Image (cartoon, helix red, strand yellow):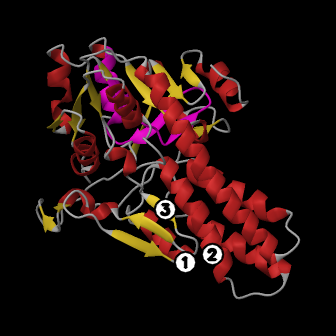
Amino acid sequence: MPGEVGLSIRAVQWLGDRLRILDQAHLPHRLVYRELRDAEGVAQAIRGLQVRGAPLIGIAAAYGVVLGARGLPVSSLPEFRKGLEEVALALEKTRPTAVNLPRALNRMRRAWANGTGRREIEARLLEEALSLEREEEEAAEKMGHHGAELLADGDLVLTHCNSGSLATAGVGTALGVIKVAHRQGKHIQVLVSETRPLLQGARLTAWELKQEGIPFTLITDSMAGYFMKKGEVKAVITGADRIAANGDSANKIGTYTLAVLAMEHGIPFYLVAPTSTIDLSLASGEGIPIEERDPREVTHFAGASIAPRGSRAANPAFDVTPHHYISAIITEKGVLREPYEERLKKAMAGQDA
């Protein structure tokens, strides 16, 4: 069956007493796995983009709490709970934009809140982390099927950044839709934007598509408008890191540009994200925190400087796409369209679209 190789990708895996991660910093040239045995190691992996993607960050952080709980050198229950909160806070500070991270950690807080002993709490934390991973995997499969209905045989689809198995559990979000459509026998072809400055498209998405046997063409970010104007692109499909109550969405820097171009050329622009990425506490995208990363990621490439010494560089990792540019938001609850405020509330309440 198409996709058999790619479906085996496990970006994180709980091994009973440690967390095994696929270190994405080494892809596509080397397949390097690391085993993390404490919460600090998990935090460093998230901060250093060895583990990345909104849903996967949440999953990894949940396991980070499990590891942190096992390593706390305290005896009393109040001290244990205090130590767990310190672990959670340290993990929460690693990356600010994706809401999946604080949401996963809040789930872990609820899991430890009512425990009556250390062993019971540790068991609850592991159960919660395993449940979170399982739920994200099931959501990805559902999103893949909902989104695949929007793609026709032979479509050329443009995607940005990486939103596949390397970014979540299971088949992925936006890339999961493409994978499911491919499994269904639709001859989907993909334009992969390189995604500067860290090249998640060129390094990660292209690698995943190659694993799946899905035809793709790699382009620079600035080529997107050229291909849209030629009339070849039938849909733009990306993931999301946080979706506000009105449908405004934060995703990898450059997504907003693609949404504007798509509207100009009459091309549908789809977001794919689980309900764990929806943040109803924010009325609009204006309140979404945008991560600012090291300017050296812009001024240097593979460790070598590509700009004059002393050049100033800006490096926002995300931008926000206003909801009126978004044709549909695909969640595990179904395909949501305007008015987003009403339909996102229903989705968060557990109702299907």
Tell which tag, 3 or 1, sits nearer the viewer.
3
Q: Which residues are magenta?
A: 236-263
Q: Mark 1 or mark 2, which is nearer the start of the sequence?
A: 1
Residue 200, image x, y percentages: 28, 49
Q: Residue at x 66, y 79 (%)?
A: 70
Would you say residue 318 sits in the magenta stretch? no
**Residue at point 23% right, 19% down?**
233
Please name the amino acid that badge 3 sits on. Gln
Q: Amino acid at mark 1?
A: Asp
Badge 2: few (under 14), some or many (20 or more) residues near its Cα, within 10 Å?
many
Res 276 quadrant in image: top right
Residue beneath label 2, please?
Answer: 68
Residue lying at 78% horizontally and 57% vertically, measured from the top left: 110
Q: CA distance from mark 3 to mark 1?
A: 14 Å
> Do the numbered discs 3 and 2 sit on residues whose CB atoms are within 8 Å?
no
Question: Residue 25 lies in what quarter of the image?
Answer: bottom left
Amino acid under disc 2? Gly
Question: Splitting the image into 4 quarters, where does residue 254 fall?
Answer: top left
Q: Disc 2 versus disc 1: distance between alpha carbons?
A: 6 Å
In the image, residue 15 above or below residue 179: below
SS for dot 2: helix
Report how far apart the C-alphas of labels 3 and 2 lie in the structure: 17 Å
Indicate which disc, 3 or 2, sits on the residue closer to the N terminus: 3
Q: Which mark is residue 38?
A: 1
Q: In the rendered structure, which disc, 3 or 1, sits on the residue that comes first in sequence?
A: 3
Q: Secondary structure at mark 1?
A: loop
